[in-house]
């Protein structure tokens, strides 16, 4: 199976995300379109669009960018609770129809400002039970007609989504990506996701999680095609290894000098997957060949907690090691986003695809 290489568009109101260039109208349609077109022109399949209350609506941004591009595939992050399954299934089916099958979906279950958009806070078990039911119902709506569902969280009577999703090259519907490292999250992924996304953990940790998820797939009675795996990580690429490490260390020094200046995600240390990343720093600043853990000590979160650092050859070698473990979906990024779309598209992607 060939691998898929995506980038990241932060979809933030405030400029300068993770050291990005601060430009006028940074989240205007013209600026965002410039990034999406650059992704097309430099070999990327598409990009993950971030979600969360207080950010531009992700589905609206994805629709606008899809309309301005020819091949760009948005990986649209969405939350059960913000959407109900039938509304979401209809919106996604419509966009998939209009774009000729370019839609990918990332289901997010982590905590958010739920009350602001009318959702309620449940415990972890309830939250992931709802997510699993949401994914089950959406998949049925995309593949069946006259759907009836009477579940714990959702009810439908005689629901048929139109336009119908057209199968394309073995793809029955938009790919469902999912993240999360807790036991509850992994059971949802094993049963219902198409792709489980990992943060930038060391190879041994990713190997263990893949083995556990494959075993869980059998345990929970998975009914779909085998679960696939993806990696969401920062990749700091420069012309030489020495230049890359000098820039990485300078960036971390700047983060240390300004720590606390930017608002932190209040749920940063409650998510199991995020805590796993933060704990890596106790094992050393550099793990495996070039996985840099120091950013997590100075405010780096999510994909910015650990970085793969080096020349294009160095980073490609590391990513191929993840590929050997079974990872076939990669969501990469570094800042400034536009410059790195071009640099890594031209220098890194040819090595990965070659």
Image (cartoon, rainbow, N blue to C red):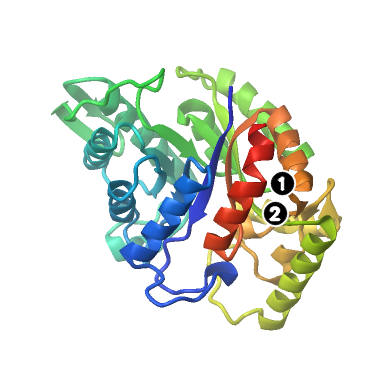
Q: 269 or 226: which is nearer to us?
A: 226
Quick check: 90 above or below 219? Answer: below
Contact check, label 1 and label 2, Cβ < 8 Å = yes
Where is mark 1, residue-wise?
201
User: In this orientation, does residue 109 appear?
Assistant: no
Q: At x 55% / y 54%, what residue is drawn?
A: 341
Q: Is residue 240 left or right of residue 350?
A: right
Quick check: 180 above or below 278? Answer: above
Q: x, y (%) of residue 251?
A: 71, 71
How many other residues sit within 10 Å of disc 1, few (<14), some (14-19) or many (≥20)? Answer: many
| Quadrant containing the N terminus in the rendered view | top right
Label drawn at residue 277: 2
- Tell which circle, 1 or 2, labels the residue nearer the N-terminal end: 1
Q: Is residue 70 left or right of residue 260?
A: left
Q: 130 or 66: which is nearer to us?
A: 66
Label drawn at residue 140: none
Q: x, y (%) of residue 52?
A: 40, 60
Q: Dot 2 lies on which element?
A: helix
Q: 343 or 227: which is nearer to us?
A: 343
């Amino acid at each position: 199976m060939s691998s898929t290489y995506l980038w990241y568009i932060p979809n933030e109101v405030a400029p300068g995300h993770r050291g990005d260039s601060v430009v006028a109208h940074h989240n205007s349609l013209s600026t965002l379109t410039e990034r999406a077109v650059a992704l097309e022109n430099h070999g990327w399949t598409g990009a993950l669009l971030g979600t969360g209350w207080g950010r531009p609506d992700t589905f609206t941004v994805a629709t606008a960018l899809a309309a301005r591009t020819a091949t760009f595939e948005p990986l649209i992050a969405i939350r059960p609770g913000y959407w109900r399954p039938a509304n979401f299934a209809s919106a996604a089916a419509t966009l998939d129809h209009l774009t000729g099958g370019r839609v990918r979906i990332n289901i997010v279950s982590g905590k958010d400002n739920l009350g602001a958009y009318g959702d309620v806070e449940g415990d972890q078990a309830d939250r992931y039970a709802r997510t699993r039911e949401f994914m089950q119902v959406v998949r049925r709506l995309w593949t069946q007609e006259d759907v009836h569902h009477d579940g714990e969280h959702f009810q439908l009577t005689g629901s048929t989504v139109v336009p119908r999703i057209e199968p394309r090259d073995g793809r029955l519907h938009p790919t469902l990506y999912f993240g999360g490292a807790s036991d509850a999250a992994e059971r949802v992924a094993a049963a219902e996701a198409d792709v489980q996304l990992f943060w930038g953990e060391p190879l041994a940790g990713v190997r263990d999680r893949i083995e556990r998820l494959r075993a869980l797939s059998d345990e929970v009675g998975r009914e779909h095609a085998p679960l696939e795996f993806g990696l969401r990580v920062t990749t700091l690429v420069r012309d030489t290894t020495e230049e890359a490490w000098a820039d990485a260390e300078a960036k971390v020094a700047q983060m240390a000098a300004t720590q606390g200046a930017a608002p932190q995600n209040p749920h940063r240390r409650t998510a199991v997957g995020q805590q796993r990343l933060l704990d890596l720093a106790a094992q050393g600043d550099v793990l495996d060949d070039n996985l840099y853990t120091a950013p997590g000590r100075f405010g780096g979160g999510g994909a910015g907690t650990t970085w793969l650092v080096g020349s294009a050859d160095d980073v490609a070698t590391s990513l191929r090691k993840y590929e050997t473990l079974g990872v076939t979906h990669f969501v990469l990024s570094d800042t400034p986003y536009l410059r790195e779309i071009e640099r890594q598209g031209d220098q890194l992607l040819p090595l990965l695809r070659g």
